[in-house]
Amino acid sequence: METRDRLFTEEQYIKQLAKYTTRIEKLNSMIEQSEKDGDEISPDLYGRLFDCRVYTIVTMYSMGENLESIKSNYILTINVLEKCWTPYGYYVQMLWLLSIGIMLEYDNNVIDKLRVLIDMKEVKDRVYDVLLNYRFPERKEMADCVFDAVPYRAILEVSDLAKTNKLQATKRLEKYLKREWYRGHSDCAWHDDHKYGIIHDGYWSFESGALVKVLGLDDSSLKGLPYYPYDMVHWNDNIK
């Protein structure tokens, strides 16, 4: 197996996945016991379970797992997100799942679960809108802002450029990947975590891959760039 994010070794990723699996089993057991006892289950408990599930997906992708294995975990992760999501707490993770769902071409009924959560909270965000409107053209929402300006404001330029000049849109996306994406997440807990050798899920700009697919951009110049999930964008190129 060839790792996609080489800042950790395959052995390190395997150990990390084992820890996530153990935590997921423990949290599921706690939730099941609470249900049996008729106790109210805290959104925080679901939040901890969601963290383990979503970071399991990212870790599996980073270590080089095949995409079918990743897809098998996706639905379970969404089911947990429905119980704990807020735009303030899980904006980035929602964007990951929405982007992965677009790239791996999940059915609309699956993506619709994410749409319902976003629309229910009336989140004004261009990135969400561009991705959702691709799958649900009748929706027609298009915000002129992003929920989290740093680093996602660049996506406003990418989506606007794509209407008239797809080459320039790709170049703007390339700048975003090279200079803005990672630096723009300096306030995230996972930023620079590879330096400590304890835990590292992987660094991926999943929304960049989804935008390439949605906007119809030529991403040949992006192949091999750090943070760009090229093989996820092209996972079905050779499927007959």
Image: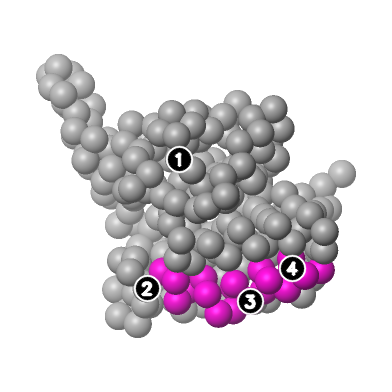
Secondary structure beneath disc 3?
helix
Mark toward the start of the polypeptide (3 vs 2): 3
User: Mark 1 belongs to which amino acid?
Assistant: Val
Q: Residue furthest bottom?
A: 195
User: Mark 4 belongs to which amino acid?
Assistant: Thr
- Please name the residue that numbered disc 2 is placed on: 186
Secondary structure beneath disc 1?
loop
Residue span colored magenta: 167-185
Quick check: 182 above or below 139?
below
The crowd level at tag 4 (other Cα within 10 Å; few <14, some 14-19, many 20+) is many
Mark toward the start of the polypeptide (2 vs 4): 4
Mark toward the start of the polypeptide (3 vs 4): 4
Mark toward the start of the polypeptide (4 vs 1): 1
User: Mark 3 belongs to which amino acid?
Assistant: Lys
- Main secondary structure of the magenta stretch: helix
Can the viewer see residue 232 in this picture? no
- 3D distance between C-alphas at marks 2 and 4: 24 Å
Q: Is residue 121 left or right of residue 5?
A: left
- 3D distance between C-alphas at marks 3 and 2: 17 Å
Judging from the image, the colouring scheme is one colour
Residue 175 is tagged as 3
Residue drawn at point x = 30 percent, y = 80 percent: 196
Q: Residue furthest front?
A: 144
- Please name the residue that numbered disc 4 is placed on: 170
Mark toward the start of the polypeptide (1 vs 3): 1
Secondary structure beneath disc 2?
loop
Q: Quadrant of the C terminus?
A: top right
